[in-house]
Image (cartoon, rainbow, N blue to C red):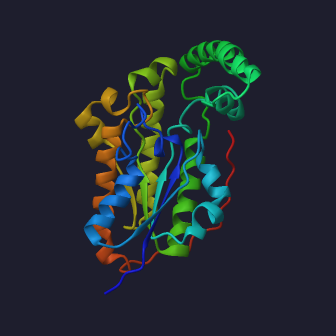
Amino acid sequence: MTHRPLNVVVIGNSVTYQQIPPRTRSDEGIYAEVLRDDVAAATGRPVNLYLEGGWFDLIDTAARRYEQSIRNHLPDVVVLHYGTNEAQPYLVPLRVLRHLIRHEPAVTRLGHFYRTKVVTAVWRVLRAYRQAASRILGERTWQLRPSVFTATLTHLATAIRRDMRALVLIVDINEPGDRLEHFLPGSRGRVRTYRATLEKAVRQIGDPDVRLVPVSGVTRSLGIEAALPDGIHFSNEAHARFGAELAEQVLAWLPTRDATTTDDARPLDVEART
């Protein structure tokens, strides 16, 4: 029997694609690549991978671009990987953060001067401010309130199930490493709050094909610092192990893919600012 290709969409923030340190060989894939390759090898069918990760993206980006980034790929499996950025305190506009911490190669002397001198100096001051303010403010401010995050996630997951009947794998949030906790004090507590609301949201969706996939097994087996060298992004080994875990989820689901039903999703209605 000939099967059509399996379409997999992985959408989220930079954790979906960033490797620390960068790969030194082409076969040191990110977890999405490992997922694709493992499923293809186990089933003998082609797997099309659509990576829609974005630098410092929040989940409202996925909601706004649902048609282009998710639905139009006609996915069989969707991996949603958000939460790390949303759980951070809202201390400066997101656009400013994206600009200052983006690693862009300078192509002119002026651009090189701007990146190495101006941006570096501004970022040092801003980093110190964020460190102090995060310690003082605690959980009084968020990039995205936990209630808004989970409402958006619920609407997105149920829309995917309604439109494509796809398996939805929601990636749990990594416990922050020491580096992130140092520069944004209180990050571990904020992530615990987010994880609790995330677990509650998945339970309330009540669909066996909308699943929360923990990452704690990977970070626990490798150790947080080895799994998340910069405090946020996966190491190559962590990518490999987590990709294998996701592949196991997909392979277990494939034989029963048409066995469940869900209620219609409500329209997407997202307010993404605190």
Vertical order, 231 against 6 (above or below): above
Q: Position of residue 174 (x, y in %)?
A: 40, 38
Q: 153 or 45: nearer the eye? A: 45
- The mark total stands at 0
Q: Judge from the rendering whether residue 197 lies leftward or rightward of residue 119; answer left or right.
A: left
Q: Position of residue 184 (x, y in %)?
A: 52, 22
Quadrant where the N terminus sits is bottom left
The residue under the point 63% across, 50% down is 60
Horizontal side, residue 90 vs residue 50: left or right: right
Vertically, is 260 above or below 53?
below
- Which residue does the image show at 55% across and 29% down from the upper left? 139
Q: Nearer the viewer, residue 147 or 153?
A: 153
Q: Is residue 243 visible?
A: yes
The quarter holding residue 129 reads top right
Q: Nearer the viewer, residue 90 or 27?
A: 27
Q: Percent from the top left, x then y, of residue 108?
A: 73, 25
- Quadrant of residue 116 in the image? top right
Q: Residue 62 placed where, x, y %?
A: 61, 54
Q: Residue at x 54, y 49 (%)?
A: 53
Which residue of the protein is positioned furthest toward the bottom in this rendering? 1
* 260 over 116 or under it: above or below: below
Q: Residue at x 51, y 19 (%)?
A: 183
